[in-house]
Image (tube, rainbow, N blue to C red):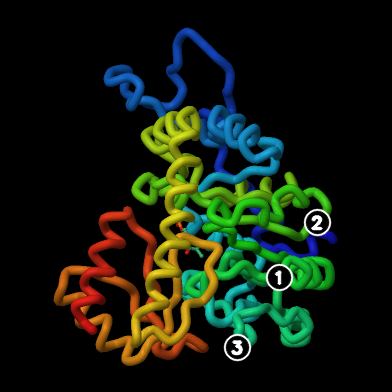
């Protein structure tokens, strides 16, 4: 794969901003180079533009090198940067599966980039050949999501690999929920695929949606494209500090994951007994998609009871379905109680 042929022309030739912290990165006694205020340490200082300390920690955690990591303001940032780097507005396209996470299409729309939607099968599987057939030389990116939102299932690994190996552009695999699907990440194979970008996040299993920290893993060549076009100081100090703390305490996250998986299995079993529940789709994530009689009515009823779920009934292939996030045992109990009263 030749990255230069895929990149937008203006991005290829772009001269990136060079910050004070880019030009001098070592330790020094006196920093008088960035027009910072000398008071109010450490918040007076600009953060490390490349987040070296945090990347070292994440690299060890994930079994990759720091050069294979980009960190952004949520996953939203790498999604947007990928489109801006590779898709010429008004000309190029990206391909997504349908149904999937809504942000890819919105980010494409903001950038005036066409979207090709390739339907999953009725059982929410990826048809790799159908997807490849629907891409052309203008299609620069494919977005896959596994476990997929809102369906909850992991895409078949062979189907994903068929796309990665045969699509001539960049394949983005969004693994936001992969911590709830142990052993199913493609990250251990990242090095084999120079056109693969894997997205993960601190928003779900790590319980840190509020600090806005998303990760992209890819070849050092692709990562340097991200670094060239991102805002110079895209991750603030507070986020970097909090994330470092969180990783020190990763046993807690592992506990949460175990607990949430157990709750997911419990909820899947218990919800089956309700007469209005028609089908519970198998989930590898921290939510379940439930098909039921009169989903909208159940949604409105639950809302009255103070329990908010997501109505996905209008989404392709998800008619009459609610997406239910797995909460604490108590919260899930409240949902069950409310549903019992509905019978
Ligand atoms: C929740 C979610 C994310 C996370 O987005 P952040 O911007 O990192 O909070 C990414 N992808 C999918 C599919 C999601 O459902």
Q: Is mark 2 within 8 Å of ligand 1?
A: no
**Furthest residue in direction top, as rendered:** 29
Label 2, residues with CA under 10 Å away: few <14, some 14-19, many ≥20: some
Mark 2 vs mark 1: give the one in front: 1
Residue at 74%, 48% (x, y): give it.
Answer: 188
Q: CA distance from mark 3 to mark 2?
A: 29 Å
Residue at 65%, 53% (x, y): give it.
Answer: 14
Q: Secondary structure at mark 1?
A: loop
Camera-nearest residue between 329 and 136: 329
- Is the residue under label 1 in contact with that under label 2 (CB below 8 Å)? no
Which mark is drawn over residue 193? 2
List the residue tagged with mark 1: 156
Q: Secondary structure at mark 2?
A: loop
List the residue tagged with mark 3: 122
Quadrant position of residue 181: bottom right
Where the N terminus falls, by quadrant?
bottom right
Report if residue 88 is visible in the image: yes
Q: Is residue 255 left or right of residue 275?
A: right
Q: Is residue 330 above or below residue 144?
A: above
**Furthest residue in direction front, as rendered:** 273
Q: Is mark 3 within 8 Å of ligand 1?
A: no
**Furthest residue in direction left, as rendered:** 304
Mark 3 vs mark 2: give the one in front: 3
Report if residue 107 is visible in the image: no
Q: Secondary structure at mark 3?
A: loop
Where the C terminus falls, by quadrant?
bottom left
Q: Is mark 1 within 8 Å of ligand 1?
A: no
Q: CA distance from mark 2 to mark 1?
A: 17 Å
Which mark is drawn over residue 261? none
Residue at 42%, 78% (x, y): give it.
Answer: 290
Residue at 47%, 86% (x, y): give it.
Answer: 318
Q: Is residue 29 above or below residue 163?
A: above
């Amino acid at each position: 794969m030749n990255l230069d042929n895929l990149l937008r022309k203006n991005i290829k030739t772009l001269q990136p901003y060079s910050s004070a912290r880019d030009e001098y990165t070592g330790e020094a006694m006196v920093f008088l180079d960035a027009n910072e205020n000398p008071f109010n340490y450490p918040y007076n200082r600009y953060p490390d533009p490349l987040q070296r300390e945090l990347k070292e920690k994440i690299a060890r955690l994930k079994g990759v090198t720091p050069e294979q990591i980009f960190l952004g303001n949520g996953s939203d940032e790498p999604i947007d940067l990928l489109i801006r780097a590779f898709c010429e507005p008004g000309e190029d396209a990206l391909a997504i599966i349908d149904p999937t996470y809504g942000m890819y299409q919105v980010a494409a729309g903001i950038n005036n980039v066409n979207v090709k939607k390739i339907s999953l099968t009725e059982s929410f599987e990826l048809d790799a050949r159908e997807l490849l057939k629907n891409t052309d030389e203008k299609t620069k990116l494919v977005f896959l999501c596994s476990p997929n939102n809102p369906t909850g299932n992991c895409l078949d690994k062979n189907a994903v690999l068929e796309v990665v190996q045969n699509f001539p552009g960049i394949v983005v695999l969004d693994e936001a929920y992969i911590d709830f699907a142990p052993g199913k990440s493609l990250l251990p194979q990242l090095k084999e695929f120079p056109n693969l970008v894997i997205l993960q996040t601190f928003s779900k299993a790590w319980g840190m949606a509020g600090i806005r920290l998303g990760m992209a893993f890819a070849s050092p060549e692709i990562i340097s494209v991200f670094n060239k076009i991102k805002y110079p100081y895209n991750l603030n100090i507070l986020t970097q500090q909090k994330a470092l703390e969180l990783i020190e305490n990763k046993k807690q996250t592992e506990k949460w994951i175990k607990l949430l998986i157990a709750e997911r299995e419990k909820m899947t079993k218990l919800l089956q007994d309700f007469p209005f529940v028609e089908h519970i789709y198998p989930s590898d994530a921290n939510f379940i998609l439930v098909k039921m009689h009169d989903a909208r009515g159940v949604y409105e009823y639950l809302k009255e009871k103070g329990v908010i779920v997501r109505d996905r009934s209008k989404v392709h292939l998800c008619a009459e379905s609610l997406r239910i996030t797995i909460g604490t045992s108590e919260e899930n109990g409240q949902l069950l109680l409310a549903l019992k009263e509905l019978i």
